[in-house]
Image: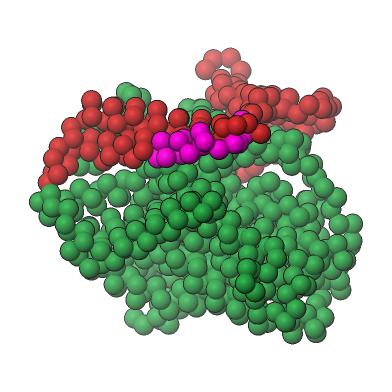
Amino acid sequence: MDTLGMLGMGFLVALSPENLFYCFLGVFLGTFIGVLPGIGSLATISMLLPLTFHVPATTAIIMLAGIYYGASYGGSTASILLNLPGTPSAAVACLDGYPMAKQGRAGVALFMTTIASFVGASLGIVILTLFAPGLAEVALSFGPADYFAMMLLGLVAAATLTQGSPAKGIAMVLFGLCLGMVGTDVQTGQQRFTFDIPYLSDGVSLVAIAMGIFGVAEVIGSIGRVTNREVTSQKITMRSMMPTKADWKASWKPMLRGTGVGSFFGALPGAGGTIASFMSYAVEKKVAKDPSRFGKGAIEGIAAPESANNAAAQTAFIPTLTLGIPGDSVMALMLGALIIQGIQPGPRLMTEYPELFWGLIASFWLGNIMLLVLNIPLIGLWVAMLRIPYSILYPAILLFICIGVFSINNSHFDVLVVMFFGVLGYIMIKLKFEPAPLLLGFILGPLMEEHLRRAMLLSRGDLAVFWERPISAGFLSVTAVLLLFAIYATIRGRNVAAALRRSAANNPPAGA
Amino acid sequence: MYRRDWTDIIGGLLLLVFGVWFLWHAQTYYNLGEMRRMGPGAFPAGLGVLMAIFGLLIMIPAWFRPGDLPVPAIRPLICIIGGGLGFALVVEPYGLVPATFAVVCISALAERELRPVRTFILAVALAIMAVTVFSKGLGIPVPAFRWGSY
């Protein structure tokens, strides 16, 4: 069947009443929780992950994807109205969104965000549809050595491109890999790091790690820190949301440029939405006739990063679904959810589970239309939610985490494990370790070990296989370049993300 | 500001200790195998070595630069974790509603300002929601109350 035929089948899958309902539920809950201050999209997805265990795999992943883009949309709402980014990628929305809100144009900013998200996501989906099948075909010729090298590249990229020092990022990846070792060794059946606790023989639960580190730890870190700042008292009416003709004219080109930047960075391993949105903001500032308007409520400063962020959210699924390599920690959660459902993502996913792959792609479109329909009339509700004080919010979040994790196995032991990881996550926050790369290491750890052992078995213990095979040699050289770059950046006393942010947020880049 | 960057010194030290322990555990209890047939201990042992190296890499430069001493917020830490533990201990023997009260009341102590009435109202509201959404709606087999034998 050709791509169009497959896509048609995907729409049939996504339009089934059950999938449609869960897509809607995901988008709604994702926006609902994402809009709450102090809760990022990673925390939102991990909190809602247990809800998807009761439904079939395709439905589950459709719902999770809905939660993901719902949460990232909700995050930008909080950024614009409160100057309080829920997610790093939403931090860009603060730069010009909050000044716009202060100028009484909050409605226009929110409306433009919605439109830009939709444009970015739709074009991102087209790119996903065009490139994913080809990539999957290429990936079918990968051997174990190539896979190992590719995963190494993914991990190093994720670790070195995070905020903070690259060494700490790599340390977190390594820690994640170590956590992934807990459980039964696939090849020999040996119990590793289980300490005779039967619960651990299946490994540490992904949900417990994610909820502990991104949910509980974030709550502990936010108490006393997240205060409700004044929400704009403007009434957000339909009329106030309508952009002027000049706004449209100023925005459509930035949206397209943002989509291009976002699609490219989203598909790269380790880059993802945050870097994409900062890059597109920097691009807009470069091409603008009057760069000094940025940071003071320029509409391009919302339109471009928002479409970049959402295009990246779609193209990030390309490596995740076709290679089984998640680009960032959100994708690692998606991958983990698929594995829990018994599906191993990789180049065969598309041929073995075509209804899942194409159904998911079709659901992206439906989900984004729902987001559009849902958000424009419901913005008033989201604004009202921003007024909920954190002192009411956090006991509810904690309760939800407890019930959610308890419901997986009906065992209080899971709750204890979440609390353990909550403490661990809080220690990481305090010691300024960015915990997100840990999740990537945790998901990829067992796969990496398996591929390494298989590669060594095939090559009879000859490490040369890694540079004799052109594909793995290519991945390894990119990895080496990244590492060298990270070392260079560390010596220069700055990291890649900070350098990008500086050039995007502050004065015009040096030399301009 | 301190003369040394204690944040990274502590972080690096923890990584170093963990890495060495991981290596020791892997090579003591699991078979390392050989290059052509790696045993279950080989990959973890390698990870332990790398963890220790990165611990040192983070720790050593931090010794020579000024930085902060991380101060944990003890009260939120204890109250939030306590709330979770309260839930875990209460939910099986006594049911969902007492567990909800345990979470809400213990975690509410995390804030300096205590508002007993508001906390009570919040607990009642969340308990009603938890029972309707989770027990009735999603069919999670945990009763609202459980008295007597367990």
> Foreground: B21 or A130?
B21
- Decide: is A277 above or below B18: below
- Decide: is B108 above or below A130: above
Instruction: Give the chain letter for red.
Output: B
Residue at point 68% right, 46% down? A38
Q: Colour of chain A?
A: green
> Foreground: A162 or B120?
A162
Q: Position of residue A115 (x, y in %)?
A: 69, 74
In the image, A279: left or right of A410?
right
Bounds of the magenta segment: B54-70
Residue at point 60% right, 78% down? A257
Q: Quadrant of the N terminus of chain A?
A: bottom left
Is residue B62 inside the magenta stretch? Answer: yes
Q: Position of residue A92 (x, y in %)?
A: 67, 62
Residue that protrudes farthest toward the left in the picture: A460
Residue at point 20% right, 48% down? A453
In the image, B24: left or right of A401?
left
Residue at point 71% right, 35% down? A223
Q: Position of residue B68 (x, y in %)?
A: 62, 34
> Foreground: A266 or A129?
A266
Q: Quadrant of the C terminus of chain A?
A: bottom right
> Foreground: A310 or A462?
A462
